[in-house]
Image: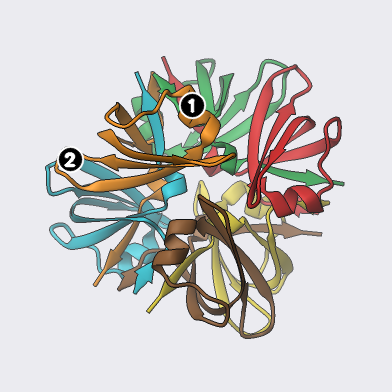
Chain colours: A cyan, B orange, C brown, D yellow, E red, F green
Amino acid sequence: MEVSARNQIKGTVKELNADQVMAEVVLTLPGGAELVSVITAASAKRLNLAVGKEITIIIKSTDVMLASE
Amino acid sequence: MEVSARNQIKGTVKELNADQVMAEVVLTLPGGAELVSVITAASAKRLNLAVGKEITIIIKSTDVMLASE
Amino acid sequence: MEVSARNQIKGTVKELNADQVMAEVVLTLPGGAELVSVITAASAKRLNLAVGKEITIIIKSTDVMLASE
Amino acid sequence: MEVSARNQIKGTVKELNADQVMAEVVLTLPGGAELVSVITAASAKRLNLAVGKEITIIIKSTDVMLASE
Amino acid sequence: MEVSARNQIKGTVKELNADQVMAEVVLTLPGGAELVSVITAASAKRLNLAVGKEITIIIKSTDVMLASE
Amino acid sequence: MEVSARNQIKGTVKELNADQVMAEVVLTLPGGAELVSVITAASAKRLNLAVGKEITIIIKSTDVMLASE
């Protein structure tokens, strides 16, 4: 499946913290950088997320903000 | 300034393509991966974006989607 | 590929209107209802969008607002 | 009230699951398809959401992603 | 119509700048502060936006980021 | 730090309500209007949010919707 969201990066689940409705997922990128994702707890379950699992990170280009010093 | 958006990554502007309202910015991450950002043309101007400029990429955790094979 | 975004609906491209950076896509759902999507012109090209093409519509649950009379 | 968000669809509340901050609402569309919305628990209360209630679903066009096989 | 989006503020259109797909709207709040909105050009037309028009500004609570010095 | 998000307003924390993953923050603007923000509980902690604290509110222009009567 090809998705319109422009950004698709490989990552590994490092931490997973879920409550009743939402789940927070800490991801490690190949270079060692970390990214945090908050999805619904139901989606975390449906994707079988677990520490160590390799996943694809998808981000819409309009959700990527920039900042300069 | 400390921002609530959890994800803040360093990157370099690789390409810049603006029309009257919107601008598309291609960024290179330290490991070589690319990320695309779409912001308003006015913001691209205000941040003095130019090819080669180093910037900070900011992404809210609720905007980070995950996918598994 | 299984995506964390909870909502995935089938639709057909009815209209396509692109400028330099952004593209507007009018979609028809099976029941006849219409949905409008705005993505980057580059993504519309990459997905080979064209009038009549069948596609999957993906919407994050936190992007679905509700209103009552 | 006329809202700038392009997509406004009628739906019925099928399930409602709230915790302290967030609420998950499963909606049925006229054709039988389902859509999931995550809003704040306070908004779910303010809108008097309940199973069986008819509501309007509002989605911004920039939040509608597309995917092709 | 009662909308789940928590934030609804009154404002006045100060500037309007549209291209083929997108429109940028500068708004003045009662206290004099300014807010910028980017919506589709089609929505700007549908809402009959014009300089001086009074409108309601709607923002989802998950789209409000915070920063501290 | 200069951020691409166009809207940056000063505000004061009026209420703070957090659960395990998410936090809801009620903010007062200089003119007396209120704005609600939902961020992760971890970000609320990292920013040392507390009732009475002055903060900067940041909103992307594509997240500002408009409505007319």
Can you give x and y, in whole percent of width and height, for residue B66 in the image? 32, 60
Say which residue label 1 marks. Answer: B45
How busy is the neighbourhood of tag 1: few (under 14 within 10 Å), some, or many (20 plus)?
Answer: few
Q: Residue at x 60, y 26 (%)?
A: F27
Mark 2–mark 1 distance (CA, rounded to whole Å): 28 Å
Q: Is residue C3 left or right of residue E2?
A: left
Nearest to the eye among marks 2 and 1: give it: 1
Chain ID of residue with mark 2: A
Q: Is residue E65 visible?
A: yes
Say which residue label 2 marks. Answer: A33
Q: Is residue D38 visible?
A: no
Can you give x and y, in whole percent of width and height, for residue A22 in the image? 41, 54
Can you give x and y, in whole percent of width and height, for residue C48 in the image? 43, 72
In the rendered structure, which amino acid carries the disc numbered 1?
A: Lys
From the viewer's perspective, is residue C2 above or below residue E16? below
Q: Is residue E34 left or right of residue A22?
A: right
Any mark on residue F26, and which? none
Number of marks in picture? 2
Q: In the image shown, does B54 or D29 lie closer to the viewer?
A: B54
Displayed quadrant of residue C32 = bottom right
Q: In the image shown, does C45 or E42 lie closer to the viewer?
A: C45
Q: Is residue E33 left or right of residue D23?
A: right
Q: Residue at x 50, y 15 (%)?
A: F53
Q: Residue at x 47, y 68 (%)?
A: D66
Chain ID of residue with mark 1: B
Q: Is residue E16 left or right of residue F10?
A: right
Displayed quadrant of residue F21 = top left
In the rendered structure, which amino acid carries the disc numbered 2?
A: Ala
For mark 1, give the secondary structure. Answer: helix
